[in-house]
Image (cartoon, rainbow, N blue to C red):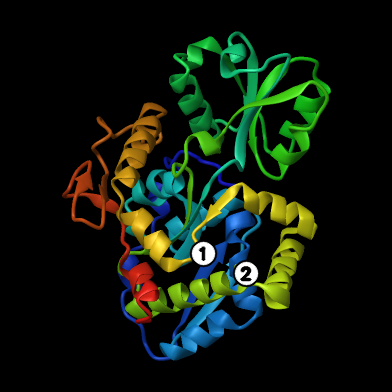
Amino acid sequence: MRKLISLLSLIAAVATPAAFAQSAPGKIYDVCWSHYTGWEPWAYADEKGLLKKWGAKYGIGIRLTLVNDYVESVNLYTAGKYQACAMTNMDALTIPAVGGVDSTALIVGDFSNGNDGIVIKNGKTVKDLKGKKVKLVQLSVSHYLLSRALTMNGMTEKDVTLVNTSDADIGALFLAEKTGAAVTWNPILLKVRNGKGVSMVFDSSKTPGEIIDMMVIRTDAPDALKKALTGAWYETMAAMSGSGKPAKDAIALMAAKAGGTVAEFEAQLKATAMFYKAAEAAKFTKSPKLKETMEFVRTFSFDKGLFGQGARTKDAVGIGFPDGSTLGNPKNVKLRFDATYMQLAADGKL
């Protein structure tokens, strides 16, 4: 889930986004997603025919593809195979945007509110990380979370030793050792935090709104695709946040698609701040807090070399916001936060 990589190997593979600019009646558009609590609703929207329904309303077809490797899904989007892809705010900046693909955060679905955390053995606070080896997927949202935790506690990465560890191994390796620390995400976090002698000293609820999960689309993708995806998403949100059997069935389907139990999925949802209402998502996207978050994100990303060797400052890539303001180069805006379609959904105008 939600790993970061350098764009150096991808830049040459970027497809020309103009190829997706116009929609012919009945044209099929490819969209991808990968497993994560906040993205499982796309499986529901597909299986229940909501993507087909909303696509038909706007005279297009939508073909949804699950890509089991998250990084690969973002790479394929960047290279031009998909017109839209589920990804985080950080990855949207450091992969397609840095790679020159003009992209828009079409739907801001949720933010991690405890789904990502830092665990430690033989310690109770972030300051107890000093001198310890910390297992994590480097250059990932885990790395970002650790950086924020250290900064908020008057520390730096020089106070710890980073051990790059794959998400497949991190849980077992951490539990097997007598000391040390790890940064990871659910469902791994749910398992390791309850281990013997383990304390969770920091989680993403302490940096609310910073690890954002979105559906990102090529900026020049057709209006029909943007409206259809947004309509299908919020119909799904209404189903899963409702009451009674329909909501239970929706949660059960998503849990099954995620490969877990209903109880496990519901536990992960509790640590995920879902924007079930379009108005809530639009408000979040328009808020000044989002600019503060993206300032943290772009600073971290540039400092870690994720803008590529050619970037001399963190202003190399522009990030646009609904009020028309920009972080970075206003002549090179490649990541846009746009509340237009979420607001249309909120206003019942889709």
Q: Amino acid at mark 1?
A: Tyr
Determine the secondary structure under disc 2.
helix
Q: For the view shown, which residue lies furthest in the top direction?
A: 131
Q: Residue 240's mark?
A: 2
* Picture coordinates of residue 221, whole percent (x, y): 35, 71
Q: For the view shown, which residue lies furthest in the left direction?
A: 331
**253 over 113 or under it: above or below:** below
* Picture coordinates of residue 218, whole percent (x, y): 36, 64
Q: Give how far apart the Cα atoms at labels 1 and 2 are.
A: 9 Å
* Picture coordinates of residue 320, whole percent (x, y): 25, 52
| Left or right: 255 in relation to 153 | right
Quadrant of residue 245 within the rendered picture: bottom right
Residue occupying the point 32% across, 80% down: 22
Q: Is residue 139 visible?
A: no
Q: According to the image, label 1 marks what residue?
A: 276
Quadrant of residue 52 within the rendered picture: bottom right
**90 over 46 or under it: above or below:** above
Of 164 and 198, nearer the camera is 198
Residue occupying the point 25% across, 31% down: 313
Of 214 and 332, nearer the camera is 214
* Picture coordinates of residue 233, whole percent (x, y): 51, 71
Q: Amino acid at mark 2?
A: Met
**122 over 139 or under it: above or below:** above
Residue occupying the point 62% across, 12% down: 128
Q: Is residue 21 visible?
A: yes
Neighbour tally class for label 1: few under 14, some 14-19, many 20 plus, Cα within 10 Å: many
Q: Report if the CB atoms under discs 1 and 2 are less than 8 Å apart.
A: yes
